[in-house]
Image: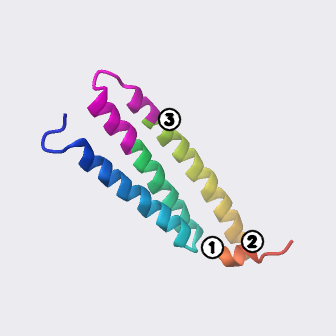
Amino acid sequence: MILGVSIYEILTVSTIIFFIGVYGFFTRKNLIAMLMSIELILNSSVLNFVVINKYLFPQSIDGNIFSLFIIAIAAAETALALAIIINLYRLIMSLKTEEIETMKN
């Protein structure tokens, strides 16, 4: 469907993006970096929906609709997570996960 690009190449890129997001989530100590890693994971799933829809079912738009829902949910999740992160920063003046874990009531 896309000239010069096979489905395997795009799915390989999507897999690489997914595992970069997983690696970033588990290795980062900053909450903002962890949020960015979650966004990478969601974007790789959006890419999978669009590519599979385009190559396997070109007459259908189901993959595009699912992608729009994922993007909307990701935007809401980001807004909520940023609000929580800002409140945590106001309380303890740090975004590192070790300092948040040691915070006492």
Residue 34, given in percent of the width and then of the height, sits at: 54, 65
Is label 3 or label 2 in front?
Answer: 3
Residue at point 71% right, 73% down? 100
Whether residue 84 appears in magenta in the rendering, the answer is no
Distance between mark 3 and mark 2 Cα atoms: 33 Å
Q: Considering depth in this image, is 7 or 31 the residue closer to the camera?
A: 7
Per the image, the residue denoted by label 3 is 69
Q: Which one is earlier in the sequence, the residue at label 1 or at label 3?
A: 3
Residue at point 65% right, 73% down? 97
The rendered magenta stretch, by its main secondary structure, is classed as: helix
Q: In this view, does 14 lie to the left or right of 28?
A: left
* The quadrant where residue 73 appears: top right
Mark 3 is surrounded, within 10 Å at the Cα level, by few (under 14), some (14 to 19) or many (20 or more) other residues, namely few
Q: In this view, does 94 lie above or below 70?
A: below
The reply to whether the C-beta atoms of the residues labelled 3 and 2 are less than 8 Å apart is no
Residue 40, given in percent of the width and then of the height, sits at: 44, 56
Quarter of the figure with the N terminus:
top left
Q: Which mark is residue 95?
A: 1
Residue 50, given in percent of the width and then of the height, sits at: 35, 37
The type of residue carrying mark 2 is Leu
Per the image, the residue denoted by label 2 is 91
Q: Residue 58 carries which label?
A: none
Residue farthest front in this picture: 8
Distance between mark 1 and mark 3 Cα atoms: 29 Å
Residue 42, given in percent of the width and then of the height, sits at: 47, 49
Q: Considering depth in this image, is 60 or 88 the residue closer to the camera?
A: 60
* The quadrant where residue 87 appears: bottom right
Is label 1 or label 3 in front?
Answer: 3
Mark 1 is surrounded, within 10 Å at the Cα level, by few (under 14), some (14 to 19) or many (20 or more) other residues, namely some
Give, as a single range, the part of the protein colored magenta: 47-66
Residue farthest right in this picture: 105
The type of residue carrying mark 3 is Phe
